[in-house]
Amino acid sequence: MVWDAAQQLDEGLKNTWGFAQLLEHIDIGILVLDIEKRAIDYCNAAFFEVLQDDQLCRNYQGLYDLFVRNIEELDDFERAGHISHQVTYQGRLFGHSVYQAAQRYRCVFIRDITEKSRLESIAQAANAMDNIGFIFSGIRHEIGNPLNSLKMALSVLKQNAPTASPEMLTEYVERGLADIGRMEYLLKALKTFSLYDNVELKDWHLVEFMEKFISLVERDFHSYGIRIRTNIPLDIARVRIDERALHQALLNIFNNAADALKDRIGSEIAISAETRGKLVWLIIADNGCGIYPEQLKHLFQPFNTSKVTGNGLGLVITRKLLAMMNTDIDVASQSGSGTQVTIRLPIAV
């Protein structure tokens, strides 16, 4: 069908009206700043509702300094729109993204995430307490063994101090220092459980990271009759992650696997990794009871759980932690056939 000029104009006006209505009724604050003219080019109705400060809403410089200035100074400003930023103003927390629209315009999408952040903090704290209880016995063993060994070495030295040879003294001192080193390593690893607001991305060798993680949980899992098997190539690409965030995420996943493997013969968790494009796929698979299809649909919904003592927050927090690292998670499972969790980690540049 061929439209004449009048029809095209009429359709164009309808489209313009439609976009304008959409922007005015959307619940996200939209702000467009003209950098050259140092002026506010556009803002929708939700923008005033979100900020709740008429004076700031009409202040170009204040808005630029609050939402744009620091982001423009980033080395990867061109990618700023793909990253969610946070800023605090008058006791409230705002999440915002900044896009460069042409050369002179900055488009800012703003939301008040104060309450969302508060609820996430509560959930994260509750989840962390559950995880601390789960690994406590392992920590007790890891500290208790070298501590008892150190106590024995010092007792022997005390009893034999007057007659001990230099060789004997050296041997027991070195043994004691080695035990202290083991405890120091554990204390450093425990820092991964501290709560935090921002991720700190660093390049990590995945084999090294997984060895550290497994050393903390392996004893408990073995005591439950669960075998942990790893198959990660030594030459696999380095990944860019936050050590604490990935540690917490994996702990949540392993906790779920432990529940699924309870009272099953030949229980096993298999860990593997492979490179696909610019990502390293880390795969954690168990041969547990699996997940019913209906449960799988709602897996990442808060407070959705089939566990009697569960809070339904573990996977919610896991997904959030991974998203903070530009990483995602996929869960595949069938009832009675185990579960496979895939985490796609960015390769270090």
Image (spheres, rainbow, N blue to C red):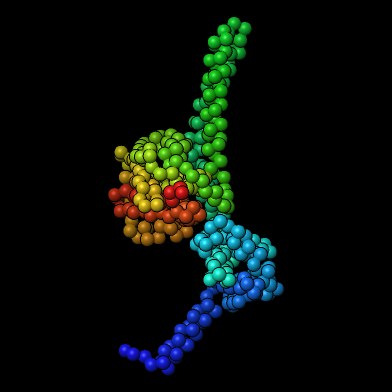
In this view of the protein, can residue 105 be seen by the observer?
yes
Report the residue at 37% width, 58% height from top: 295
Percent coordinates x, y for residue 210 in the rendering: 43, 40
Residue 346 falls left or right of residue 115: left
In this view of the protein, can residue 220 be seen by the observer?
no
Q: Residue furthest top?
A: 163
Percent coordinates x, y for residue 162 in the rendering: 62, 7
Looking at the picture, tell me which residue is in the foreground, 51 or 267: 51
Report the residue at 46% width, 37% height from top: 212
Report the residue at 38% width, 93% height from top: 4
Looking at the picture, tell me which residue is in the foreground, 219 or 46: 46
Residue 117 falls left or right of residue 14: right
The image quadrant of residue 93 is bottom right
The image quadrant of residue 56 is bottom right
Give the vertical position of 161 relative to 123 (above or below).
Answer: above
Give the vertical position of 282 relative to 68 (above or below).
Answer: above
Looking at the picture, tell me which residue is in the foreground, 115 or 223: 115
Percent coordinates x, y for residue 229 in the rendering: 35, 38
Image quadrant containing the N terminus:
bottom left
Percent coordinates x, y for residue 58 in the rendering: 67, 75
Report the residue at 47% width, 59% height from top: 302
